[in-house]
Image: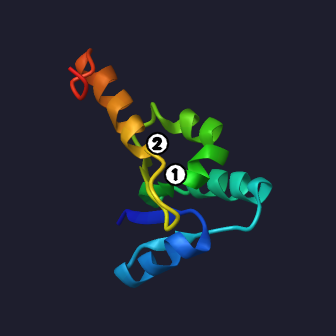
Amino acid sequence: MYKIAVFGDKESVYGFSALGLDAYYTESPEKDILAFKKLCSNQNYSIIYVTEAAAVILEKEIEKFREEPSPAIILIPGVKGNTGEGLSAVSRSVEKAVGSDIFNS
């Protein structure tokens, strides 16, 4: 059975454990990259939610998995607010799939 993980700062992800999701957080950018690589290599996760703030640090690592069918990496806002990166990522994916920017037409 596939599982869902949430990755980001502690304040943003710890509440997801109550919903049955696996929450992962670290203290530094270097540890974030190593932990994220390990998490993505785990074949049990089909979806990994990443806070927008963590995605800035993990941008290169996330890009490596963008073309892979699993895990699906989805950006979410953190407790400190929405940076707009999550919506931009969805827009880029839709534009790539459809062939045009349907959000700003």
Q: Is residue 67 above or below residue 57?
A: above
Q: Is residue 102 above or below residue 68?
A: above
Few, some or many C-alpha atoms within 10 Å of disc 2 (few <14, some 14-19, many ≥20)? some
Quarter of the picture containing the C terminus is top left
Location of mark 2 (residue): 85
Q: Position of residue 86 (x, y in %)?
A: 42, 45
Few, some or many C-alpha atoms within 10 Å of disc 1 (few <14, some 14-19, many ≥20)? many
Inter-mark Cα distance, 2 to 1:
6 Å
Comes first in the chain, label 2 or label 1: 1
Location of mark 1 (residue): 52
Query: Does the rendering let one see residue 41?
Result: no
What is the residue that sits farthest to the top in this orientation?
Answer: 99
C-beta proximity under 8 Å, tags 2 and 1: yes
Q: Residue at x 44, y 54 (%)?
A: 82
Query: Does the rendering let one see residue 98?
Result: yes
Q: Amino acid at mark 2?
A: Glu
Q: Position of residue 43 (x, y in %)?
A: 50, 55
Instruction: Give the quarter of the image for residue 102.
Output: top left
Q: Nearer the viewer, residue 70 or 20?
A: 20
Q: Position of residue 36 (x, y in %)?
A: 63, 54
Q: Position of residue 56 (x, y in %)?
A: 61, 45
Q: Is residue 56 above or below residue 15?
A: above
Q: Residue at x 40, y 36 (%)?
A: 88
Q: Amino acid at mark 1?
A: Glu
Quarter of the picture containing the N terminus is bottom left
The image's mark for residue 89 is none
Q: Nearer the viewer, residue 54 or 20?
A: 54
Q: Nearer the viewer, residue 66 or 58?
A: 58
